[in-house]
Image (cartoon, grey):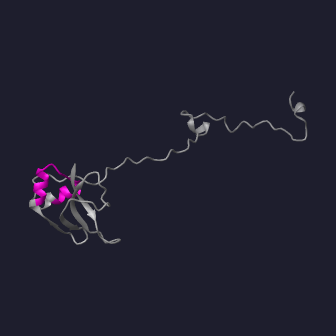
Amino acid sequence: MLKIRLQRVGRKHEPNFRIVLTDSENSTKSGRYKEVLGSYDPRKNVDQIDAERAKYWLSQGAEATGTVHNLLVTHKIIDAKKKNVLPKKRPIVKPAEPVVEAPVEAVAETPVEEAPAETPAPEVSTETSPEAVVE
């Protein structure tokens, strides 16, 4: 199947592209193409497309990639809507938070009534053994 796609020809950090007709099985970096249909410079926003040849190959069954399709629509070579070529957004997955159990007092919904402060607590002396305290 034939495709009209971009082939990068620029230097590092200076992208320039050829718009080429190639077999879909060829990689974009292979250098194998059937015909050059134009060029595209995204930094200067300059593009040149051979409209008649592009229309001819599209009529013969060649498919344009998303970006090339949008360029053809911009130049009004084909009458269609632009395609969304941005990658789909993936849902944000939050890392699992460690489960921390709340203290028992915080979990209780009804407040526990405290003993009145007037009643003193029994005193336990540390000098005597625990058996002596229990009578």
Query: In the figure, is residue 72 to the left or right of 27?
Result: left
Q: Is residue 121 left or right of residue 102?
A: right
Image quarter in which the C terminus is found: top right
Is 97 colored magenta in this rendering? no
**Front position in the image: 78 or 35:** 35
Residue at horizontal 13%, vertical 52%? 58
**Observer-nearest of 23 and 113:** 23
Magenta stretch, main secondary structure class: helix
Q: Position of residue 25 (x, y in %)?
A: 29, 51
Total numbered labels placed on residues in the image: 0
> On the rendered structure, is 36 left or right of 56?
right
Q: Which of the 4 image quarters holds residue 32?
A: bottom left
The image shows residue 49, relative to residue 90, as above or below, that is below
**Residue, far top:** 135
The image position of residue 83, as x and y in percent, is 20, 52
Which residue is painted at 61% across and 36% down in the image? Answer: 104
Q: Quadrant of residue 16?
A: bottom left
Residue 105 coordinates in the image, percent (x, y): 60, 37
Q: Is residue 120 left or right of residue 29?
A: right
Residue 57 in magenta?
yes
Residue found at x 9% / y 53%: 79
What residue lies at 29% left-to-right and 62% top-to-bottom?
A: 31
Q: Which residues are magenta?
A: 53-71
Closer to the camera, 94 or 29? 29
Image height check: is 32 above or below 13?
Answer: above
